Image (cartoon, rainbow, N blue to C red):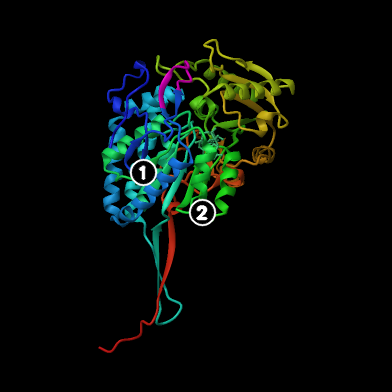
Amino acid sequence: MNGNRPSGTSRLALSDPSLLSSRALVGGDWVDADAGGTCEVTNPADGTRVGTIPDMGAAEARRAIDAAHAAFPAWSRRSAGERAEVLGRMHALLIEHQEDLARLMTAEQGKPLAEARGEVAYAASYLQWFAEEARRAYGDTIPGHAADARILTLRQPVGVVAAITPWNFPSAMLARKLAPALAAGCTVVAKPATQTPLSALALGVLAGRAGVPAGVLNIVTGRDAAAIGGELTGNAKVRKLSFTGSTAVGKTLMAQCAAGMKRISMELGGNAPFIVFEDADLDAAVEGAIASKFRNTGQTCICANRLFVHEAVYDAFAARLGDAMAKLRVGDGLAGETDQGPLIDGKALEKVEEHVADAVARGARVAMGGRRHALGGTFYEPTLLLGATPDMLLAREETFGPVAPLFRFSSEDEAVALANDTEAGLAGYFYTRDLARAWRVAEALECGIVGINTGRVSTAVAPFGGVKESGTGREGSKYGLDDYTELKYVCIGGIRPGTP
Ligand code: NAP
């Protein structure tokens, strides 16, 4: 199942060029849009064309749903072990093609190559984890309510799943949905972000090689997200929507799903607090802040967005963070070793500029950066802002850029109140060496994910998800499979004592 027309720049230099697809995947066939239209995928580092994808709409989405619906009975009836083997093969293929997949991702997304390699390994880890979890979709037996009754529960696949994913983690966000869905016995219609669809299509190529049957995974591409999303949320054959993206779009899709009472998982935007208490190991806090703040040029949902620093260590932390930031290498990930790539597009650049200008107008001081990078395009300098305050735009919204604003606080209660003063509730981080404080603050933070003395929290083995307006549902871990299954209760009556 591979009818790709290789395209794109020679700079990509893939050892397996068939991973670069210019067609979408519907019912096991690689297809163009009905009307033949295409969208260009460009490299945010230099604006060059990486490839093209079909510009599809509702009609193609409907056909993909029909294909997924037709494939569901056979796939869901396979044994868990058989499904696990397919996922296991897909995991191995991702690892085998890690370098090509990473180059493709850096080309369409802009992240440093080392980060792209890490994301491919992270995506693969979900396939491995859920290959293992597929065999453990256990039900229960429950002591019956009557002497002649027996009660048990079954976990059954929800059916056709629609998966809509964002541009910032083009492989991992799809793998995090695809792996549990397929493990549970569901079939999938995926719609990747239009800016970064090539990584998703490459996963589609590898899924075919791994033995994922025709129709079990479908990938629809196109710039009319509202039309495709309207079909995915309005079609009665789709039983669940799993969405990762902005809170605004998540709310729209949640409302659309209400009419058909579809199951939903929503992984939405964050506004992570990063608290440095006076008893913190400052070097560790700086290392964690760099990892959390500057990964993917600050374009992650769990990025430290607001850094709260106790007044007793504020100046020392600011100085050490500035020293570490000065070492960040900014550049095109395909051109050499880099730590920070470009922002995804001009709109993202304008938002960062708006946040910095607003902060400065409200009294923040630029200690480093604060302007576009000399490389031009959408490159922005790693930026350190001192004297940030809660009235600034960057305190209320995700900046989604390489900007570290330092807020000052003087007590634990104040830090927790500041951290929780947001509608978002995805990740939160803090640094302390006080065990009692570690418990108190972990329990008090209104977040789905808490990192204590670490800025790195993403792993397939832990439940990932938010509270408040950051969404609902959990991906990864032993809980991740539940979101793709229905719990059925079976009551058996009339079990009376027999005569020997
Ligand atoms: P976005 O604008 O919400 O787009 C996400 C996806 O939704 C894309 O595939 C997009 O398609 C599609 N979409 C947009 N409008 C739609 C509509 N009306 N109906 C159906 N689909 C629609 O978000 P983004 O800018 O790509 O991603 C950044 C956001 O994702 C940030 O807020 C970030 O925090 C969040 N995020 C959250 C997590 C998490 O796990 N909680 C992880 C990563 C990112 P097009 O590309 O075609 O517009």
Q: Position of residue 253 (x, y in %)?
A: 56, 45
Q: Which residues are magenta?
A: 42-52
Whether the residues at callouts 2 and 1 have beta carbons within 8 Å, the answer is: no
Residue visible at 40% across and 14% down in the picture: 335
The residue indicated by pointer 2 is: 262
The residue indicated by pointer 1 is: 217
Q: Residue pushed farthest bottom?
A: 499
Q: Position of residue 22 (x, y in %)?
A: 37, 28
Q: Position of residue 75 (x, y in %)?
A: 32, 52
Residue visible at 36% across and 59% down in the picture: 138
Q: How many marks?
A: 2
Secondary structure under the numbered disc 2 in the rendered image: loop
Kindly tell me whether residue 312 is visible in this rendering.
Answer: no
What type is the residue that disc 2 sits on? Lys
Does 49 appear in magenta?
yes
Placement of the C terminus among the 4 image quadrants: bottom left
User: In the figure, residue 493 lies in which quadrant?
Assistant: bottom left
Q: Position of residue 196 (x, y in %)?
A: 45, 29
